[in-house]
Image (cartoon, rainbow, N blue to C red):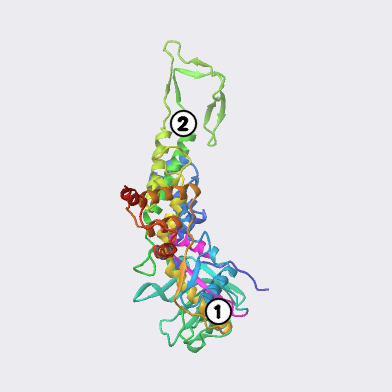
Amino acid sequence: MPKYAAPLPPMRMGSPRVRHTQLRLRMLHGTWHDDLREHIRLSVGAVRAKAWGPPQLTACPARDLAETVSVLYDDDAAVSHALDARAAAQVAERWRVMQARSAMRQAQVYTELTNECGRQLYVDPETGRMRLRIVTPDLLDGIADPLRPGVPVELTEWCQRLVRDRWTWVREVWSVRDLDAPSYRVLDSEDRDITEQVHGRSYDGGDWPDVYRRADGRPFLPWDITHSVAEPAALWNPWYRIETIDSTMVVARHSAYIDHCMTQAANPQRCVYNMAPAGSQRREADDGTPVAVLQGDASSVLAFEPLDEQVQAMQWQWDAGAELGTMQDVYERRLGLIAQSWGLSPDDLVRQTSDPRSGIALSLSRSGTREVQQRRAPVYRPHDERLAAMTAACMNRLDGGSRPESGYRIEYALLPLSTGEQQQLERETLALYDRGLIPAEIAVARIMGTTPDAARAQLDAARRDGTLATTTPAAAEEAAP
């Protein structure tokens, strides 16, 4: 068995883009304690930060929002093709077998939080089995197509490979910049080509894997880079929504301060003058300093004795040092503002309190989920249609089929209406139709959840059969004698 040595991250991965992306990933994975601790120290100083104690990760809006809006793959997407329905069904079945939907859903979470994510259609060279690999953008680099800035023509992945019985970081470089000379290379940390050491052969020019070629012989990258915007200006956009990351740090700092105040400053402060507690014990602190200790709690009765009989002894109480209610209200308002910056309506946020100002619960209602699905579908549809075409091409190379290798269409399943929402939609639609404000095909399309063209065809068929009135109820009432 080869010896396993814990690999070290490559030095060339220390760019600002990579470091910031890794911060976002730590937020997603719940490992950003040190980042929050450093943020608090820089914000309030080392002395106050130490007094607050270790910070607790009680909230992470960046992670919560990425999870909340990643609802596009809650159900299987429908794959279709205008010229070959059978091929589309085969592609959809292959996605089901390779459990692509769960990988797509995870890729959407990464994309929403880090703005990009790599998806590789990997075909096992020995078994021919496919799977969808998800690679975070901190492990990727690449060169984009000049005419399509978001589409790579060369992609580099940092990964671990077994080289000379040792696990080490390498760079796998896939390139179709020159369609006549595609290449796949494995480079070590010193940019030496070790492809033959890892795979036993090279993959340059005509040796490019046939499974990643189209029917006409053109090579293609088995990669797709998803983006959080529809038309990215570059292959990487790491700083988009940086306000959310900064705000996550701020609200986490506020949460730490609220916790500190709740622990240390939520009770009234009692004070005495010219008095000493009776029954106190003398002890030594950690540094040897003598201190007086008096054990007590909210139910105990404390006795005091005057220090100087000639001076009036006094006792008073200050109010609590922190307005916890006010601070909590500001904290929750900030959470609501962060959610709104992602285009989420406050009315669509499911709250745990009756206060309409509260945005602390970053979960969506059914209507809010559908709105997010409709808004994000145009962003992800081109990527999934490209993936469907790549899947068909790989299937053709594996089994000699002749499926179309372009022209696939993806439709996402929206969350269905609840019974109450459906009834409300019907009432509103019929009211508009009765007043003659919308035509019949629009009314049918809204109620049945279909397209206006399909609704128009249904209405035409019903009119030919004589089973549908040709006027609105309002018009019929006005025409009555």
Q: CA distance from mark 1 to mark 2?
A: 66 Å
Residue 310, above or below 316: above
**Neighbour tally class for label 2: few under 14, some 14-19, many 20 plus, Cα within 10 Å:** some
Q: Which residue is mark 1?
A: 395
Front position in the image: 418 or 204: 418
Front position in the image: 106 or 463: 463
Query: Which amino acid, mark 1?
Result: Met
**For the point 41% across and 30% down, which residue is it?**
321
Give the label, 1 or 2, closer to the camera: 1
Query: Which amino acid, mark 2?
Result: Ala
Front position in the image: 344 or 333: 344
Residue 435, above or below 236: above
Based on the displayed image, in which of its 4 quarters is residue 179 positioned? bottom left
**For the point 57% across and 82% down, which residue is it?**
398
Q: Is residue 399 magenta?
A: no
The label number, if any, that marks residue 39 in the structure image: none
**Neighbour tally class for label 1: few under 14, some 14-19, many 20 plus, Cα within 10 Å:** many
Q: Is residue 124 magenta?
A: yes
- The quarter of the rendered structure image containing the N terminus is bottom right
Q: Position of residue 26 (x, y in %)?
A: 49, 56
Segment colored magenta = 103-126
Q: Which residue is mark 2?
A: 266
Q: Position of residue 383 (x, y in %)?
A: 44, 69
Q: Position of residue 213 (x, y in %)?
A: 49, 83
Question: Circle 1 — which element?
Answer: helix
Based on the displayed image, in which of its 4 quarters is residue 401 positioned? bottom right
Residue furthest to the right: 1
Q: Position of residue 156 (x, y in %)?
A: 46, 74
Residue furthest to the bottom: 206
Front position in the image: 386 or 6: 386
